[in-house]
Image (spheres, rainbow, N blue to C red):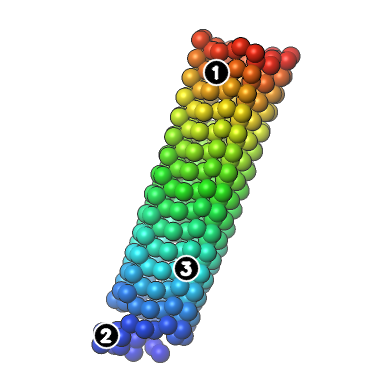
Amino acid sequence: MDANELKKLYKAGKRNFCHLSLRRVNLSGAILSGADLSGAIIWEANLSGTDLSKANLSKANLSKANLSRTDLNGANLSGAELSGANLIKADLSGANFLKTNLIKADFSGANLIKADLRGADLNGANLSRSNLRGANLSKTDLIVANLYGANLYGANLIKADLTIAILSEANLSKAILSEANLYGANLIKADLSGANLIKADLRGANLWEANLTGADLRGANLYGANLIKAGLSGANLIKTDFSVANLYEANLSEANLSEANLSGAILIKTNLNKADLCKAILESANLTGAMLAGTILSKQKIITAS
């Protein structure tokens, strides 16, 4: 079936186009809202600017398709193949991407508000400056993904894999990142205020000037992380591992660091005013020039601290 025939049938009221073969078809600007294209083969097709809102594209093959500025609002793309697809500035709000293959897909500037991306494979995908506000990304593969400047406010990233992902200047305020893997991630100047990072893996992550004000990092692992000039005021850091981390000029005022591990950490000129360091481990930590006004230091373990 070619593009003209499909559009003619759609205009006549037909909506069932499942399992069709539409390789490299040009449907740019077409209106196919609510169409059933489940299982269809549409790879390398031109669907730019097409209206596919509320369409069923489950298990369809759209690899390397051009879906830039396409309207996929509320569409079902669960289990679909979209590796290498172009979704630049597409409207994907409320779309279903459950367990979809999105490896190296380009979502830059796309609208993914409240999209369901649970279990999707976004390895190496470009999501820079995309809007993922309130999206569900739990257990999603975002290894080496580019989320520079993305809006992830209130997003669900529970147990998501963000290993070596780029999240610099991203908005992760109030996001849920409990047990997420952020090993080696770039979070320079990211906004993580009020975020849930309980038991998150942030080993070797770069959090230079990141905003973690009021964040919950209980039991998180920040071994060797870069937290230079990071803001952690009022954060919950109970039993958090900061061993060998660099907290130079970081703000930890009024933070709860009880039973935290700060062994070997760099705390030079760090603001610890009114912080709770009860039972914290400070073995070999460097506290040169640290601000300690009103700091709770009872029963802390300071062994050969500098």
Q: Is residue 154 left or right of residue 200?
A: left
**Residue 164 % position (x, y):** 60, 47
**Mark 2 → mark 1, Cα distance in angstroms:** 67 Å
Residue 50 in view, yes or no: no
Closer to the eye: label 2 or 1: 1
Residue carrying label 3: 78
User: Looking at numbered disc 1 in the image, what kind of residue is underneath it?
Assistant: Asp
Residue carrying label 1: 276
Mark toward the start of the polypeptide (2 vs 1): 2
Q: How would you rate the neighbour count of disc 3 (Cα within 10 Å): few for under 14, some for 14-19, many for 20 or more?
A: many
User: Looking at numbered disc 3 in the image, what kind of residue is underneath it?
Assistant: Ser
Mark toward the start of the polypeptide (1 vs 3): 3
Q: Residue at x 46, y 84 (%)?
A: 19
Which residue occupies the foreground of this view, 62 or 279?
Answer: 279
Element type where label 3 sits in the image: loop
Mark toward the start of the polypeptide (2 vs 3): 2
Which residue occupies the foreground of this view, 239 or 211?
Answer: 239
Element type where label 2 sits in the image: loop
In this rendering, the answer to whether 219 lies above or below 23 is above
Q: How would you rate the neighbour count of disc 2 (Cα within 10 Å): few for under 14, some for 14-19, many for 20 or more?
A: few
**Mark 2 → mark 3, Cα distance in angstroms:** 25 Å
**Mark 1 → mark 3, Cα distance in angstroms:** 47 Å
Residue carrying label 2: 13
- Asked if labels 1 and 2 touch by Cβ distance under 8 angstroms, the answer is no
For residue 242, which quarter of the picture? top right
Label placed on residue 144: none
Q: Is residue 145 left or right of residue 94?
A: right
**Residue 194 % position (x, y):** 44, 34
In this rendering, the answer to whether 166 lies above or below 241 is below
Which residue occupies the foreground of this view, 121 or 25?
Answer: 121
